[in-house]
Image (tube, grey):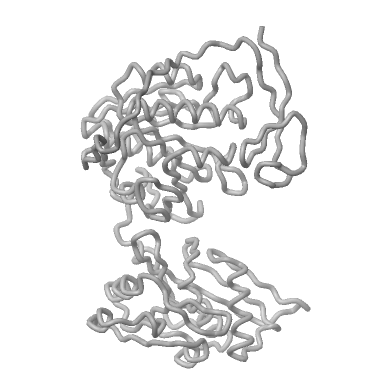
Amino acid sequence: MAKEKQVYFCKECGYESAKWLGQCPGCRQWNTFVEERVRTGNAKASAFVREKVTPTGILTVTTADETRIKTGIAELDRVLGGGIVQGSLVLVGGDPGIGKSTILLQMCRNLVHADHEVLYVSGEESASQIKMRAERLGAFSKDMSLLCTNDMDDVSAALESSSAKVAVIDSIQTMICEEVGSAPGTVTQVREVTARLMQLAKQKNIAVFIVGHVTKEGTVAGPRTLEHMVDSVLYFEGDGAEGFRVLRGVKNRFGSTNEVGVFTMTESGLVEVDNPSSLMLSGRPKGVSGSVVISSIEGTRSILLELQALVCQTNFNMPRRTSVGVDYNRVNLIMAVMEKRANMNLWGYDAYVSIAGGMKVSDPAVDLGIACAIASSMNNKAIPDDMMIIGEIGLAGEIRGVRDALQRVKEADKMGFTTCMLPSASIDNHMKALDIKLIGVSSLTEALSHI
């Protein structure tokens, strides 16, 4: 007879304790323990049968190109590193309604049209609901297997009996293992279900995509170990009010990390954006102070973005500092350097900095663009519309070199910009051959004097 007992798990690392603790001994995080009830004793036997495995010599392992399966969506293939790797476990996370299930259903449609067998498992929708959503995205000319259940034993049996090479689990928080005995979505269930799926993916050579719900902090609900167990972690970003979505590869064992794919949401699903720079710069005002074009490297591509700043006198004893799309502490640091090294009195002014379009940027090469936008707004002098600005600012006021400077300049030249301000250390002979004027700067005061 199975018995229940009360235990506590850490949401971050999965540490188990018999009592509640304020600080986790494993990851040292505070207030991360949650209460769960688990069964002990004679549990239901699992339908999953383990196969006997033997070691394999590394010299006998083949890595042919045909092990990758094209999804039919170029932007998704880019984020995955060139296509789907057989036997991989991919986690797709994002806010509700951002497009996780949509892009996976579009991927499944393309795969079955390319004669790949696919199994779509849903623990949230019925078969008729999935069919209605599929018809809105586009007609299926070939059949696809559907399984509407949240029992992990049924999913394991279906994957073992079918010849599917790609499987989609929507979502991981709805799956349940009967032998665990806790509610769906708890730390124990998510960890056990993911371990079962990972074992199935490796032994059966099936590529498994799992959809993960996110918390209010923007992380996948469940233990942090979930992201360590999977091979790739993809996050959907974008404001619900905006028309575009950004798919970012946070972790990828088979390709580059921080690779991004850009999509626009339409009535018929997600549509790829071949030229993200053109989309991000559409509707940019001309001749307005505080507006500047910057370049950010996202994975292997350079994307031009519009950065806007608004500086106005404050009505409070302490000025306000607000940033959207860029790190708040980074903006404060740049403004402190401007006050100290460029003799600009910003202490009596409110400052608002934003990346137009809702894009989030962590590239240090946007530092100089932030400083120039703030100076432009404060002096009410517009920066030339055909100028792109890149550069990292040090605490001494120096402009440091940036990575992939040539790629950024080529993107600006392709988009029709005639001038580029960049660190002097980043200028090379390959840039001089381009049809664009280069302004090399080595200090913040020198850069501000040009605008």
Looking at the picture, how far across and down is residue 330, in whole percent?
58, 70
Looking at the picture, how far across and down is residue 98, in whole percent?
47, 46
In the image, 9: left or right of 114?
Answer: right
Q: Is residue 147 above or below residue 269?
A: above
Q: Is residue 160 above or below residue 205?
A: above
Looking at the picture, how far across and down is residue 434, in whole percent?
24, 80
Which of the 4 image quadrants contains residue 102?
top left
Depth check: 112 or 219 in front?
A: 219
Q: Residue furthest top?
A: 1
- Residue at x-position 69% and y-position 83%: 347
- Residue at x-position 72% and y-position 32%: 17
- Residue at x-position 28% and y-position 49%: 74
In the image, 91: left or right of 217?
Answer: left
In the image, 316: left or right of 251?
Answer: right
Which of the 4 image quadrants contains residue 277?
bottom left
Q: Quadrant of the N terminus?
A: top right
Depth check: 26 or 95 in front?
A: 26
Total numbered labels: 0
Which of the 4 image quadrants contains residue 378?
bottom right
Looking at the picture, how far across and down is residue 79, in whole percent?
36, 50
- Residue at x-position 45% and y-position 87%: 442
